[in-house]
Amino acid sequence: MIRIMKNTTKPLLLSFLLSGSLFFVAAGTGARPASEKQKDKNNKAAPAAGILSPDKGKFRILLEGKVIGNEDFELAPSGDTWMARDSTSAHAPDGTEIKASGQLRLSADGTPLHYEWTAQTKKKASGVVDFSGGKAKSSIDLGAKAPFLQEFTFSSPRVAVLDNNLYYQYGILALLYDRKTGGKQDFPVLIPQDSTPGSISVAALGDQQIEGEKYEALRVSSTDLEILIYLDKDHHLARLEVPSSKVSVVRE
C-alpha cells in the first residue's frame, strides 16, 4: 500500500477486511504528484461513449459468511452528467462501528469529475476531489485548522475512484473495462481517504455460475491481492469476492 499522509482516516473497513493490505502497486505506476514528470502508461483500451446505465440497490457485506454490514447505492443521470451515491454501515471484527458515504459525479463515459466523501469511526473525516484533464486536486478535512491538500497527474483521465469503504465503485471500474479489446487492462486509481494513487488491472474470466446464477466475471488484481467481480446481464455489479480475506459483497 502507498502512503502519502502520516495522518489518515484508517483503520477503516477495507483495512480490516483485507488485513491491512490494499490493492495497489508501487507509487508512480498510476499517478505522480503534479510537480513530477508524467509518463504515459499502458491504458490501451478506449471507453465507449455512454457506458453508464441507471442502477439502484443494496449490498450485504459478509465476512466468513456472516453479515457485518450493508451498503446502499444508486447510479443515476444528473443533468448532462451522472451521479453515483453510496452509503455503508458496518462493524469491523474488532467491534469498531463504521459509517461512510460518497458522491461521485461522472461523465457518460465513466470519467470522474468530482467526488465528495465522509467517513466516521471514532472520529469523523471528509474530503473532496476535483478531476480535470487527467489531474486530481484533493482536499481532506481531519478536523485540523486547515485541510490537507494535494494534487496528482494521472496517465489517463479514466481514473478509478475506489473508496476504502464503498464497494459499488468496483461496479463502475468494471464498466471502464473495454470488452471489445479484452485481455488485461490497467487503470490509474485514487483512494480518496488516503489521498493515495496507484494502478490496478482488470481481466475477463468469462461467464461463471454461482448458486445457480450466471454472471460475467472479472478479476481485479495487483501484485499482492485478487478481487473477483461478478456482473449481471446488464453489466451491473451483483457480487464481489475477496478470496484471501473471506469477504463477500452480495446484492440483495
Image: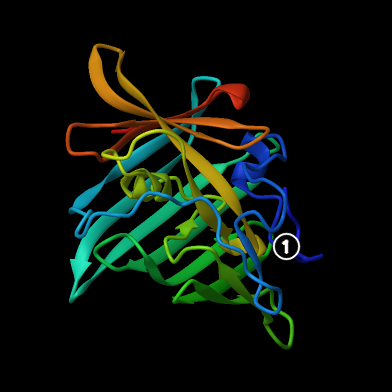
Say above or below: 69 vs 142: above
Pick whichever, 67 or 78, lies toward us: 78
Please state, as top left, top right, bottom left or bottom right, where the C terminus lies in the image. Answer: top left
Say above or below: 132 vs 207: below
Q: Quadrant of residue 16?
A: top right
Q: Residue furthest bottom?
A: 145
Q: Is residue 80 left or right of residue 152?
A: left
Q: How many marks?
A: 1
Q: Is residue 10 left or right of residue 182?
A: right
Say above or below: 92 vs 228: below
Q: Position of residue 150 (x, y in %)?
A: 66, 77
Q: Count neighbours of disc 1 (C-alpha within 10 A) and say few if under 14, some if 14 to 19, many if 20 or more.
A: some
Q: Which residue is mark 1?
A: 8
Say above or below: 120 vs 240: below
Pick whichever, 67 or 75, lies toward us: 75
Name which residue lies at 64% across and 46% down.
Answer: 24
Q: Is residue 96 left or right of residue 249?
A: right
Q: How is the image coloured?
A: rainbow
